Image (cartoon, rainbow, N blue to C red):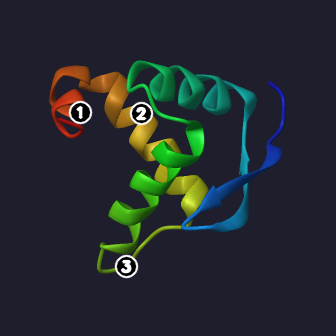
Amino acid sequence: MAGPIKRSVMIAGHATSVSLEPIFWDELKRAAEAEHLPISALVAQIDARRIGDADPPNLASAIRVWIMERLLDPVRNQADFQ
C-alpha cells in the first residue's frame, strides 16, 4: 500500500495542503467528476461541512470519512449535492 501523497488544493481562495493515500485521491477525483465539479470545489464543500461540526476533524480525515460514507451509501450521499 502506498503512503500518503500531499497535494495543494484551493479552498476559499487560499491554498491548503492535504495528504491522502492514492486510493483516496483516486476516489475523490471520481466523485468530483460524478458531481461535475473540480476537486477543489468538492473539497471546499467537504471542508464547509467539517468546520460546522462541534469538534471538527482535520481536513484529510474529513475527506476520508466523506469518501467512505459516499461509497457505503451512495443514494443518500448523492442527495446531499442536489
For the residue marked with disc 2, what is the amino acid? Met
Q: Secondary structure at mark 2?
A: helix
Q: Secondary structure at mark 3?
A: loop
Give me the residue at 74% from left, 29% from top: 22
Residue under pointer 2: 68
User: Is 69 positioned to the left or the right of 11 in the image?
Assistant: left
Choose the circle earlier in sequence order: 3 or 2.
3
Choose the circle earlier in sequence order: 1 or 3.
3
Whole-percent x and y of residue 31?
A: 46, 26
Residues tagged 1 and 3 counted as in contact (Cβ below 8 A): no
For the residue marked with disc 1, what is the amino acid? Asn
Q: Decide which of 72, 6 is in the foreground and name it.
A: 6
For the residue marked with disc 3, what is the amino acid? Asp
Q: Residue furthest bottom?
A: 54
Q: Decide which of 62, 41 is in the foreground and name it.
A: 41
Residue under pointer 3: 55
Give me the residue at 39% from left, 73% from top: 51
30 above or below 3?
Answer: above
* Label 1 neighbour load within 10 Å: few <14, some 14-19, many 20+: some
Whole-percent x and y of residue 24?
A: 62, 32
Residues tagged 1 and 2 counted as in contact (Cβ below 8 A): no
Q: Quadrant for the C terminus, please.
A: top left
Residue under pointer 1: 77
Q: Where, by quadrant of the figure, is residue 53 drawn? A: bottom left
Whole-percent x and y of residue 15?
A: 72, 64
